[in-house]
Image (spheres, rainbow, N blue to C red):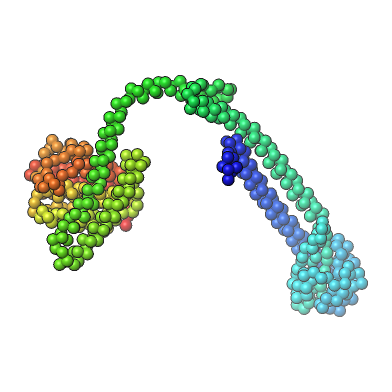
Amino acid sequence: MKLISGMRLTIRHKMLLSFTLVVFAGLLSLLLVSVTITEQNVSRLINQDVVQLKKSIDLYIGQYYLSKNVTLDQQSFQTEADSLVKELSASVSAPISVYDAEGKGLSRLNSEELPASDDFAESMGGKIAYSVIRSGSSSVVSLSSPVESNGKLIGIVHLKKNYSELDAFTNRFLTAIRWFAVAIFVLVFLTAWLLANRITKPVARLAKSVKRVAEGIYEPVPVRGGNDEIMELTQGYNLMMEQIQEQIAMIERERDALQITQQMSKTFFDNVTHELKTPLTTIRGYAQIMEENGFQDKPFFDKGMRYIIDESKRLNEKVVQLLLFSTAGSEQIAYRFERVGLSALAGSVCEDMAVRGDKYGIQIHFLADEEPLYIRGDREKLREMLLNVLDNAVKYGGVHSKITVALSRNGADRCLIRVADQGAGIPEENLSHLFEPYYRLASANSDEERGSAGLGLAIVQTIAQRHGGQVVIESAPGKGTCVTMELGGVLNV
């Protein structure tokens, strides 16, 4: 294990290994394809030759009996067997043997007593067949052709033709292909080796210079000839060495950035407070009502327990996300976009916030089209956005009033969510400041429950923008407030 961990592949070795594997795989594939195509071509040539031999045999037998003015039948086939063997052998340049329908030899000139090949057995059943017999460097095709008269098998013509020369040519061709592949492999390997050396040597010099920088030695790397990326990298590195002192001075001048870091830390903890407040508010609301009603209303008790469990899970998820947020040092948690049923989500949020509204005699009415509306978004972030807006509507809405939540399409791929309350309204001079972090309006109800860090609308605006939309607030003193959230990414049902 120590030996393996101590081994290190340099860039040069990796380049050589990559080139070698790619070229080897390519040449191996080329060889396999060449062998397959060559074998297919040889088989096709043999098959075509066998077909031509069959046609020649049939044509010659027909002409032979026609010239003799003899009818082809079993008797004449046996009588003319010697002449057929002699003349057919000369015609096709291959040894011919003739047999009767039972496989008995009919001519003393037959090249063999009884063929043991599979094609001969098939021809006795009336089928034309051939087989290739290979032994060492020799290759022989055995062809058996049935002879019929009036639809009746009267004999078999059998021949053997040597294709050793074709096999030898094929082997020489494949051997040449293999040596050619080896030559290409060697040439590419040498080229890759030279190229790797040319590329990696300047990189190695840069690596040594970087190690000296770690030791506090700022020396430029000598620029060699060339006009490629390595030369540009070297020039850029040398320029970086010259600017190090300037960067250090700049860092010293920017020490005031520590104050910004402290402010960002405070912002982080304020966001943590706001992230955790919403689910805790829901849990508290249900718990208080359940404490007052006890077990008298069993359905509501079950519903309350379910919401408490769900919000507890969501609270736990937010704690985990905040821990990840703190570890990564990121300003925002990555959104997980998916298909979200916005109609169902908005209805669920309205139902959850109705519990808080009941404490102040506030009714929440949800209006939406009959056709469900779906959006590509982050379910939890959208829920958080709606909860923040409705939470503000309950805080600043009038006691014994009504809140209307309306969901509708706005074009092909956008939608609008309007949340209108009947509160005291907001002065015009305050509207432009509502999305600023930590900006708060005076609450009309209990400060203990309704106070916040002033981050709600800033978070709402951020979530809407991440979903390709925006937030618009319309309000006037004595006329209530309407918050319109426009979102993109609406999907077809």
Q: Which of 437/315 is in front?
A: 315
Q: Answer with left or right where residue 144 lies relative to residue 363.
A: right
Q: Is residue 18 visible?
A: no
Foreground of the two, 80 or 271:
271
Q: Is residue 69 above or below residue 409?
A: below
Residue at (77, 66) in percent of width and height: 130
Left-right relation of 478 to 79: left
Above-or-below relation of 334 to 264: below
Task: Please state the horizontal and vertical placement of residue 263, each as a whole percent of the image.
Answer: 26, 33
At horizontal 39% and vertical 23% (from top left) the residue drawn is 248
Classify the position of the N terminus by image quarter.
top right
Which residue sits at x=32%, y=57%?
493
From the viewer's perspective, tell me whether residue 40 is left or right of residue 282: right
Where does the image place residue 320, in percent across and percent down from the top left?
32, 49
Q: Residue at x 76, y 59 (%)?
A: 46
**Foreground residue among 97 and 82:** 97
